Image (cartoon, helix red, strand yellow):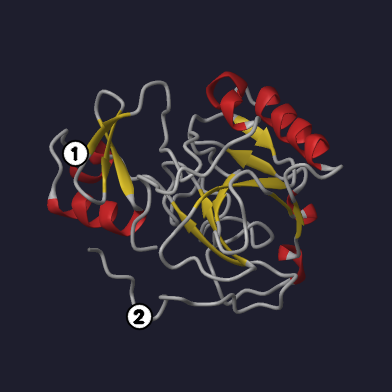
């Protein structure tokens, strides 16, 4: 069993209900962390914290030590069963959200994001709930997936070196730019938001990789990317 740090366990969102309490998570690469294809202790430590890490041959090591063949998914699969989309997929509390619910954050619309692939994407201002996390508790608590970019990576648009108006790393930052609304699956605005996400991915050349996400994901009750976060 992996224990959730007491400072975070069961923690409700700190910001007011309409403002997101945020953090980020990523998928470490064994080759970047260890300078080798063999998992080292630091890589295993990061995998336990983040939930999973990538191995050569498009394999994934989970926090449980399982090795998974990711097929054509180059990131990780969340509780939705879908391939997580960097800077679009988020983890949320399943007590309040279903897999596939969409979070609208207007301040993010049009912001230029450098994806882990190196491509540029104009953010649609929408995020898809596709994962869960042990410490992600509360109606306004979200963990933003940043692909292979850790929080200090200079290309991480939500990280410590990002412009202040896109940073998502601090749970204590309750600025109004993090104001959000929820678009439930089946609502009148749901398809419109799907199209906007699809357009942003298409414009960045990512649509073939993540096309399955822009459909109707279902919660499978577990996540290979579920670590102590």
User: Marks 1 and 2: in contact by CB < 8 Å?
Assistant: no
Q: Locate residue 185 relative to residue 128 in the image: left or right.
A: right
Q: Residue at x 52, y 30 (%)?
A: 118
Q: Locate residue 218 relative to residue 61 in the image: left or right.
A: right
Q: Locate residue 167 relative to residue 104 in the image: left or right.
A: left
Query: Front-most of 173 and 211?
Result: 211
Per the rendering, the mark at residue 35 is 1
* Vertical position of residue 208 compared to residue 66: above or below: above
Number of callouts: 2
Q: Nearer the viewer, mark 2 or mark 1?
A: 2
Please state, as top left, top right, bottom left or bottom right, where the N terminus lies in the image: bottom left
Element marked by disc 1: loop
* Measured Cα–Cα span from mark 2 to mark 1: 33 Å
Please state, as top left, top right, bottom left or bottom right, where the C terminus lies in the image: bottom left
Horizontal and vertical percent position of residue 128: 63, 45
Horizontal and vertical percent position of residue 182: 75, 56
Q: Residue at x 20, y 51 (%)?
A: 44
Element marked by disc 2: loop
In terms of image quadrants, where is residue 152? bottom left
- For marks 2 and 1 on the same chain, the one whose residue lies earlier in the sequence: 2
Few, some or many C-alpha atoms within 10 Å of disc 1 (few <14, some 14-19, many ≥20)? few
In terms of image quadrants, where is residue 92? bottom right
Query: What residue is disc 2 on?
Result: 6
């Amino acid at each position: 069993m992996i224990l959730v740090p007491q400072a975070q366990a069961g923690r409700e969102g700190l910001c007011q209900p309409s403002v997101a309490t945020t953090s980020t998570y990523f998928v470490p690469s064994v080759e970047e962390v260890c300078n080798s294809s063999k998992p080292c202790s630091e890589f295993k430590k990061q995998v336990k914290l983040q939930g999973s890490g990538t191995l050569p041959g498009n394999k994934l090591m989970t926090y449980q030590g399982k090795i998974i063949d990711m097929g054509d998914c180059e990131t990780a699969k969340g509780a939705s069963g879908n391939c997580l989309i960097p800077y679009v997929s988020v983890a949320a509390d399943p007590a309040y959200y279903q897999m596939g619910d969409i979070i609208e954050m207007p301040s993010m619309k049009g912001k230029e994001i450098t994806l882990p692939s190196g491509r540029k994407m104009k953010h649609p201002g929408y995020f898809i709930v596709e994962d869960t996390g042990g410490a992600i508790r509360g109606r306004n608590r979200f963990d933003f997936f940043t692909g292979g970019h850790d929080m200090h990576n200079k290309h991480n648009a939500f990280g410590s070196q990002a412009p202040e108006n896109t940073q998502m790393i601090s749970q204590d930052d309750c600025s109004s730019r993090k104001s959000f609304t929820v678009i439930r699956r089946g609502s009148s605005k749901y398809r419109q938001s799907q199209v906007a996400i699809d357009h942003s991915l298409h414009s960045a050349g990512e649509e073939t990789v993540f096309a399955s996400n822009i459909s109707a994901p279902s919660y499978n009750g577990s996540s290979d990317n579920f670590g102590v976060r």
